[in-house]
Image (cartoon, helix red, strand yellow):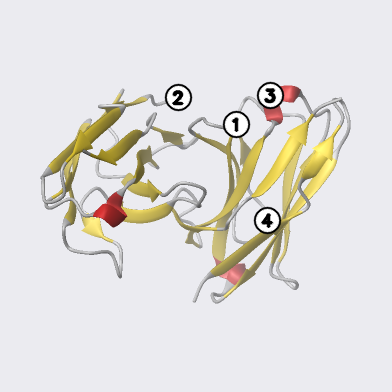
Amino acid sequence: QVQLVESGGGVVQPGRSLRLSCAASGFTFSSYAMHWVRQAPGKGLEWVAVISYDGTNKYFADSVKGRFTISRDNSKNTLYLQMSSLRAEDTAVYYCAKGGWFGDINRSDYWGQGTLVTVSS
Amino acid sequence: DIQMTQSPSSLSASVGDRVTITCQASQDISNYLNWYQQRPGKAPKLVIYDASYLETGVPSRFSGSGSGTDFTFTISSLQPEDIATYYCQQYNTLPLTFGGGTKVEIK
């Protein structure tokens, strides 16, 4: 069965950096796009970024463009989100989500359990 | 960006009631619409994809319909385990966007 396990969250000061990881299993990771989606405390869902199955195409929400990068290591079945210049408004639970097969980059289905990032001094 | 307007924002119904949630897109998204269920403290779970297809393992009391800009999500007979917040999400165009959510409670 599909499993996605996020890690790397924690408390970080404004302006600092943090890297999240998402370990995938139960499917052919290298054949699927992958997303990051976040949810601020008590709020709704906000899509953050997507990366294609082979890592060649990456897209970001305007709110994180230029500050966050997404990458993947298909040999390790792991997705990453490098976050820099963090702001208080980046405080959220960050979920990774399995995307579409090969070129179907926009789809999403299974989600991990999430990791909490708190940006505070 | 495509705006997704979901209503109502919350509802209270009795066990066995029929529950309906609507989602309107700001432009034509064909049938590229998901419905997710998020129980308190849990990750979202896909319930309906492509506007009307039931995800594997999801009870048949859940259904979805619509295309273009107007979509409907229905629980035919509300059960206690359906207490959750439900979100629509369009995947026609990046950025992916979500409705504001509908919190479903038991009366």
Real-space CA distance between mark 4 and mark 3, rounded to the nearest whole angstrom: 27 Å
Q: Quadrant of residue B85?
A: top left
What residue sits 63% from the left and 42% below the top? A93
Kind of residue indicated by mark 3 = Glu
Kind of residue indicated by mark 2 = Asp
Real-space CA distance between mark 2 and mark 3, rounded to the nearest whole angstrom: 20 Å
Q: Residues within 10 Å of mark 2 (few under 14, many from 20)?
A: few
Q: Which residue is mark 3?
A: A89
- Front residue (pair B38, A98): B38
Query: Which mark lies nearer to you, 1 or 4?
Result: 1
State whether residue B32 appears in this view. yes
Q: Which numbered disc covers residue B61?
A: none
Real-space CA distance between mark 2 and mark 1, rounded to the nearest whole angstrom: 10 Å
State whether residue A58 appears in this view. no
Give the mark, 1 or 3, whose residue is nearer the N terminus: 1
Q: Quadrant of residue B86?
A: top left
Q: Position of residue B87 (x, y in %)?
A: 36, 39
Q: Chain of mark 2?
A: B
Query: Which mark lies nearer to you, 2 or 3?
Result: 3
Residues tagged by mark 4 and mark 2 found on one chain of the structure: no
* Residues at marks 2 and 1 touching, judged by CB atoms closer than 8 Å: no
The number of numbered discs placed on residues in the rendered structure image is 4
